[in-house]
Image: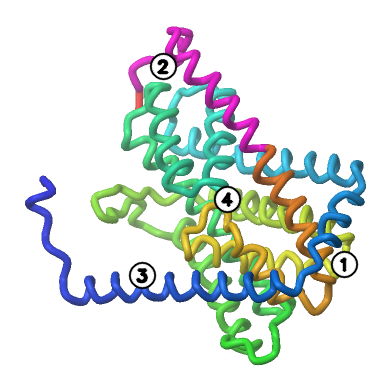
Amino acid sequence: MSTSDAPAPSARQRRWAIAKRVLVAAFLALVVFLLVRHASTVDWEEVGKALRETDPLLLAATAGLSLLSYGVYCMFDLMGRHYTGHHVPVWRTCMTSLVCYAFTINLGALVGGVGLRYRLYGRAGLKPATVSRIMMLAVFTNWSGYLLLGGALFAAGLVPTPEGWFIGDIGLRVIGAAMVATALAYLGVCAFARRRTWHVRGHAVEWPGTRMALLQLGLSTANWMLMGFIVWLLLGREPQYLPVLGVLLIAAIAGTAVHVPAGLGVLEAVFIALLGGQVPSHELLAALFAYRGVYYLAPLCLAALAYLVLELRHRHGRDPEAEPART
């Protein structure tokens, strides 16, 4: 179907699109307002001092944990290799996954999750339909674990909520229970669905089996927990780990909702709002800046070098793997 033949959006769809843009703009404006208001009260000299006083061994340990987290994410694409049956070598699949993950969390899903995956896997000989299946499996893996872990933390009341927060403690518990139910429903569909292939907007979605679904939940949960553990260590292990993890999960979904690359500003605003009463502001911001350095910026530099290597190999004809796709 050509673009001109595509049906025009209905009035309801147009209204929803407008409402969504308004809500995103309002949320982004709120984030900016909170950051500006709080920035005027922060002792930035103390922030710089706290950063300078960060233990180098702690930074090295969190950098190592960041690499471990990226390694766990790499398993998402290795599952995609098994799921689609493609024959791109394991080393190249891992390198593609690491490059895409680093670019995704820094520059957005359209750049890393979509654009680079199609480019790098296409260069390796895979058809767009196969790349789409790999990408969809990675998305389902990432968010299934998020729903299970975040839902359990929210439902258990382990995430601090500020007084007068518009959702409230009970509301967050209800949302958490619904998240857990959604993750378990996904597992149930994978285990018991008789119709294994569904079509969504022209894309064929083949449900994984029970073992792969359990592996998805396990790997994704482990990855989110590692990220929270890194932030908790940089905060000096105060407050407790599970509340810090819960706040990170809220910040992650908030950053995704407003489409801000790397959740810039959103991460800080959420942590300040939810943990500002328990951790001094200068220590909180110093820990978050260090987290951005070890989990976002350093891996992005390595990913850029890896991407350059892949491009140069292709340009100079040193890509024996880039053969016509067999899938």
Quadrant where the image shows the C terminus = top left
**Which residue is label 2 attached to?**
322
Q: Residue at x 56, y 34 (%)?
A: 99
Of labels 2 and 4, the one closer to you: 2
Query: From the viewer's perspective, is residue 301 above or below residue 172?
Result: above
Query: Along the polypeptide, which appears first: circle 2 or circle 4?
Result: 4
**Which residue is label 4 attached to?**
216
Query: Along the polypeptide, which appears first: circle 1 or circle 2?
Result: 1
Of labels 3 and 1, the one closer to you: 3
Amino acid marked by disc 4: Gln
Q: Residue at x 40, y 59 (%)?
A: 193
Q: Residue at x 64, y 69 (%)?
A: 269
Question: Cα distance, mark 2 to mark 3?
Answer: 41 Å
Which numbered marker is on residue 238?
A: 1
Quarter of the image holding residue 289?
bottom right
Magenta residues, as a range?
299-325
Query: Along the polypeptide, which appears first: circle 1 or circle 4?
Result: 4
Question: Is the residue under label 3 in contact with that under label 2 (CB below 8 Å)?
Answer: no
Amino acid marked by disc 3: Arg
Q: How is the image coloured?
A: rainbow
At mark 4, the secondary structure is helix
Lateral position of residue 14 relative to residue 60, left or right = left
Q: Which one is in front, 158 or 167?
A: 167
Residue 200 image position (x, y, % from top left): 29, 56
Main SS, magenta region, reads helix
Of labels 2 and 3, the one closer to you: 3
Question: Cα distance, mark 1 to mark 2?
Answer: 49 Å
Question: Cα distance, mark 4 to mark 3?
Answer: 32 Å
Instruction: Please tell me how crowded label 4 is: few (under 14), some (14-19), or many (20+) other residues with Cα within 10 Å.
Output: many
**Which residue is label 3 attached to?**
21
